[in-house]
Image (cartoon, rainbow, N blue to C red):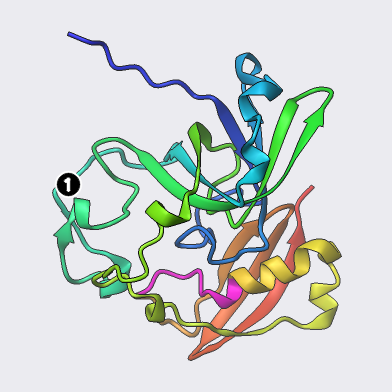
């Protein structure tokens, strides 16, 4: 019998320090930057030869921070209000028989570094900081894109955009190059889909910041920004 082995080839560095606030799908916040840093045995620039000619990549990765690894045959997707059950294989839930994720990201550039070898910079990643990467493959539009595809309950028009009230004095506490990314993440409504408590204060970790906010109807109001030391 063949022994099945899978190797970690790299880890990705992002500004997401915890799961709360990560976009629900890759590409939803396209200006997010991630850096893919290879393990030492894979830091050969020749392995990336020709990759720069592709605009997008597939990342195959591990859900490495699941609090509960138990898998059930059905789950309650947030998009269905947390009430209706569907089969695990009809969802992208992280609680699967094998904790494997798949993301389509935009290739920004490749940089040859002294300490880390070739580093791939990508946009639109929906991965937690430090996530292990199993494989990287080029995205090929004529086979990978299906404009006529149906997507059941995961319709693109389900994603509601919130108006974000981010007081200028709080926004200015954040590095300028990260300000728009944070606003775009908040606009996607990072709360669980079935949470509607207008009095509840949520806190999202992003980069070196803790951003606290309230949501009332379609307005998200930032109430506090703390810089982590």
Up the image or down, 192 lies above or below 137; here it is: below
Mark 1 lies on residue: 72
Indicate the secondary structure of the residue bearing disc 1.
Answer: loop
What residue span does the magenta drawing correspond to? 186-193
Residue at 40% over, 81% down: 157
Q: Residue at x 56, y 52 (%)?
A: 105
Q: Look at 67% across and 63% down and name the residue there.
A: 31
Can you tell which quarter of the image residue 35 is in? top right
Q: Is residue 117 magenta?
A: no
The image position of residue 166, as x and y in percent, is: 72, 81
Q: Magenta residues: mostly which secondary structure?
A: loop
Q: Does the magenta portion include 190?
A: yes
**Residue in the foreground of this view, choosing between 121 and 220:** 121
Instruction: Name the residue: 73% across, 29% down.
Output: 118
Please rate how many residues cluster around mark 1, counting C-alpha atoms within 10 Å: few if below 14, some from 14 to 19, many from 20.
Answer: few
Viewport quadrant of the N terminus = top left
Question: In this orientation, which residue lies closer to the viewer: 73 or 48?
Answer: 48
């Amino acid at each position: 019998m063949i022994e099945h082995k899978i190797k970690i080839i790299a880890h990705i560095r992002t500004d997401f320090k915890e799961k709360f606030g990560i976009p629900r799908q890759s590409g939803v916040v396209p200006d997010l930057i991630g850096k893919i840093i290879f393990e030492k045995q894979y830091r050969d620039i020749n392995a990336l030869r020709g990759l720069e000619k592709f605009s997008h990549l597939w990342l195959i990765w591990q859900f490495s921070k699941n609090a509960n690894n138990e898998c059930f045959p059905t789950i309650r997707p947030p998009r269905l209000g947390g009430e209706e059950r569907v089969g695990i294989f009809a969802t992208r839930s992280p609680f699967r028989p094998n904790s494997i994720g798949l993301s389509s990201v935009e290739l920004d550039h490749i940089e040859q570094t002294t300490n880390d070898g070739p580093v791939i910079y990508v946009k639109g990643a929906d991965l937690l900081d430090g996530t292990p990467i199993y494989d990287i493959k080029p995205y090929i539009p004529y086979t990978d894109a299906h404009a006529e595809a149906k997507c059941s309950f995961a319709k693109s028009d389900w994603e509601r955009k919130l108006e974000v009230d981010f007081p200028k004095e709080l926004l200015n506490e954040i590095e300028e190059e990260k300000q728009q990314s944070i606003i775009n993440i908040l606009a996607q409504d990072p709360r669980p889909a079935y949470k509607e408590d207008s009095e509840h204060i949520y806190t999202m970790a992003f980069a070196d910041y803790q951003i606290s906010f309230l949501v009332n109807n379609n307005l998200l109001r930032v109430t506090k920004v703390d810089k982590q030391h």
